[in-house]
Image (cartoon, rainbow, N blue to C red):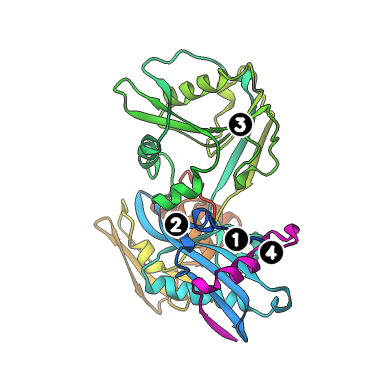
Amino acid sequence: MEFRQLSSKDREVFAKLSQYAFEPTKNTYENVVSEDFEEFKPHLKDMSQVYGYFDNDHLVSTCAFFSSAVIIRKKELSMSGIWGVATAPQYRRKGLVRQILVKILKEMRENGILISTLYPFKYSYYERFGWKLANINHRYHIELDKFISRPVANRTVREVFTLDHLKEVYSKIAGEKYNYMTKRTEDDWRRRINPKEPGFSFVCYNANDNPCGYLVLRFMEHLPPDSEGIDKSEQTIYLPEIYWNDRETKQALFNFLKTHVDHRKYVVFSSPDSNMLAFLEEARIKANEVFPGSMARIVDVISVIEAFDYSEEVNFVLKVKDPECDWNNKSFSMSVSGGKAKLEETTHTPDVSIDIGSLSQMIAGFRTASQLYDSWEIDCSKEILPVLDRLFPPQKNFFREFF
């Protein structure tokens, strides 16, 4: 079999294999590549980041990724999102996906990509290759008349018809209020809030008329990928996005939502914020579903750890177990001085031993060293756990991109 990068002439066979794997109930390949294909998958404009195995010119296994950036611990890190991993049924269980992922990880490293993310069809499957859960979200289903209305001074909510002020709010929140958010490009915004899909956008402004929060509102039945299980009746308002900078803005947005109570009954939205009951007249929510989000994986351990700022000076030996990436599968002498870390290969006895997936969770701020120790996922002395917890404190992760 031949492994190669796909070209524009392979777009249709790639789309067919992807549809067979992910949308088999369509039972047809008719119009599988529509004229607006690039509109909905803009990272496939030139097919430069799609790879696959061919058997006699027949595409049998494939994987696509696109480059972006993610903000972790207030640092912007290059990131590639993996999607479209699919194998023809007669070629499954032959290790082709593993081979593709290893090749892609090598290419990512050569191109300076530090973090890889994906949404799995099965979490345990990708854990075998080093990806691990990096965020969970609360999806709230709330009756509108249960919101407490509070007067808020110096906040107004207005409808907008461009994304400019949404982008301004998002850029302030990413890395400040929430961790593990992407630095959105124009293509990212088009994937998240497609202008061809119906909906309305509202921005909250402060006394200086500066945007401080926003929400995107939809009444339609056509909902985004994270809407599975939502009541799509006309009784429900769905918010693909809602962000606020402070409690006043949060209250103003909830006040605005409650004004819809005469013709809508529920609102559904996702947030990492668990403090919702205090905004309701009754401590009751129709549904609060906690669901897993994306998976993350460190591509290059040295580059990632050396990218951050640190508040104390330490020295220890870190052993990373990563059988898929030989450049990570080593022991490193890690020293932190002057706020920066330095890693060098060593043969000394490790003070900390951890697999690449658990290390990715700790670095991303999703789980602490103490939590990993409690679940037998890190091997170290109890004395070093507080040091690791201070080096990599927990963060409030909120990854909302879908690919």
At label 2, the amino acid type is Ile
Assess whether residue 8 is covered by the magenta stretch. Answer: yes
Q: Is residue 152 above or below residue 114?
A: above
Disc 2: which residue: 363
Depth check: 349 or 108 in front? 108
Cα separation between marks 1 and 3: 46 Å
What is the spatial separation of the Cα atoms under label 2 and label 1, in whole angstroms?
A: 17 Å
Q: Residue at x 35, y 66 (%)?
A: 303
Q: Looking at the image, can residue 321 be seen?
A: no
Q: Secondary structure at mark 2?
A: helix
Q: Nearer the viewer, mark 2 or mark 3?
A: 3
Residue where numbered disc 4 is placed = 29
Element marked by disc 3 = loop
Quadrant assignment, res 339:
bottom left
Residue 22 in the image: state x and y as whole percent: 67, 60
Mark 3, Cα crowd under 10 Å, few <14 / some 14-19 / many 20+, is some
Amino acid type of the residue that numbered disc 4 sits on in the rendered structure: Tyr
Which one is earlier in the sequence, the residue at label 2 or at label 1? 2
| Quadrant in which residue 108 is drawn | bottom left
Distance from Cα at disc 1 to Cα at disc 4? 47 Å
Residue most extreme to the left: 338
Instruction: Left or right? Give the position of 171 relative to 41.
Output: left
Q: Report how far apart the C-alphas of labels 4 and 3 lie in the structure.
A: 30 Å
Tell me if label 2 and label 1 are in contact, CB under 8 Å. no
Q: Quadrant of residue 21?
A: bottom right
4 or 2: mark nearer the eye: 4
Residue pointed to by mark 3: 219
Question: What SS does tag 1 mark?
Answer: loop
Q: Where residue 254 appears, x then y in whole percent?
A: 52, 23
CB under 8 Å between discs 2 and 3: no
